[in-house]
Image: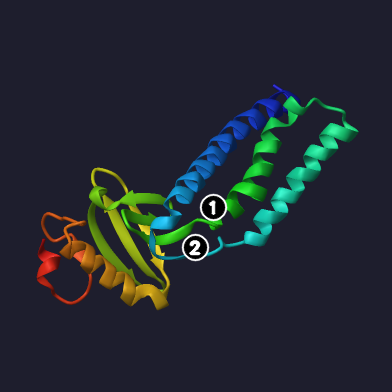
Amino acid sequence: MSLSAILPALLLMLGVGFFVANLRVAWLFVKFSGLRSAAVLTWQGPRPPYYGLILVLGVVFALLILFKLVIQERLPTQTFGEGMMFLYYSCAVPLSLRIARGFYENGIWAESGFVLYSEIGGLTWRENNEITLVVNRMERLARRLVVPKQHYGEARRLLRDKIASDDLRFSGKSLDLGRQDERDDV
């Protein structure tokens, strides 16, 4: 099988994968737009490593699409894969950076999405090079939230208040907020 036969199928598969990723980012942004007014303590997430390279990839895919459409006179349907990659690198990644991470009235917006307080099974802090709150979802994978140092104390107080008001409930020792407090034993 030749490369010219494999490449269109590969680009279609990549296009489908990037289409799903674009839909996910769009859905998260719509969800964030509805939650924006319920923000309690939020901040902008950090740019990913090599963010400039991500934007350059968006430009490269735009030029590739333009080349295929104008010079090679291909049909727009033949640029589906490249189009989805262009949308991801030039639109979806910058759009995802506009989603404010942090604490909302009903939950926590972690690095990979929103978790309701009622779905949280446990919390713990990791204090290495960066301060990270690890949110354990009930019966699901953990999510992490990188907390800027200037918001660390306020985030800890906010979590203690959520525990005191029974918005956060735990069974066993699943919360590590530092000093011993009877609300940590809930």
38 lies left or right of 68: left
Residue type, mark 2 in image: Gly
**Residue drawn at the location 57% of the way across and 40% of the way down:** 22
- In this rendering, position of residue 110 left or right of residue 87: left
The 10 Å Cα crowd at callout 2, few under 14, some 14 to 19, many 20 or more, is some
Front residue of 48 and 35 = 35
Relative side of 46 to 177, left or right: right
Residue at which label 2 appears: 45
How far apart are labels 1 and 2 at the CA level? Answer: 9 Å
Q: Is residue 31 above or below residue 10?
A: below
In the image: residue 22, left or right of residue 162 = right
Marks 1 & 2, CB-CB < 8 Å contact: yes
Question: Residue 96 — which label?
Answer: 1
Residue drawn at (90%, 34%) of the image:
71
Q: Residue at x 26, y 64 (%)?
A: 124
**Mark 1 crowd level (few <14, some 14–19, many ≥20, 10 Å Cα):** many
Question: Hey, which quadrant is residue 159 in on the image?
Answer: bottom left
- Give x and y (percent) for residue 172: 10, 57
Residue at x-position 26% and y-position 72%: 157
Residue 20 x %, y %: 53, 35
Helix, strand or loop for disc 2: loop
- Secondary structure beneath label 1: helix
Give the percent coordinates (x, y) of residue 84: 65, 37
The amino acid type of the residue labelled 1 equals Ser
Task: Decide which of tag 1 and tag 2 comes sooner along the chain.
Answer: 2
Count of picture labels: 2
Residue furthest out toward the front: 37
Which mark is drawn over residue 1? none
Q: Specify the quadrant of the image occupied by residue 87.
A: top right
Q: Quadrant of residue 26?
A: top right
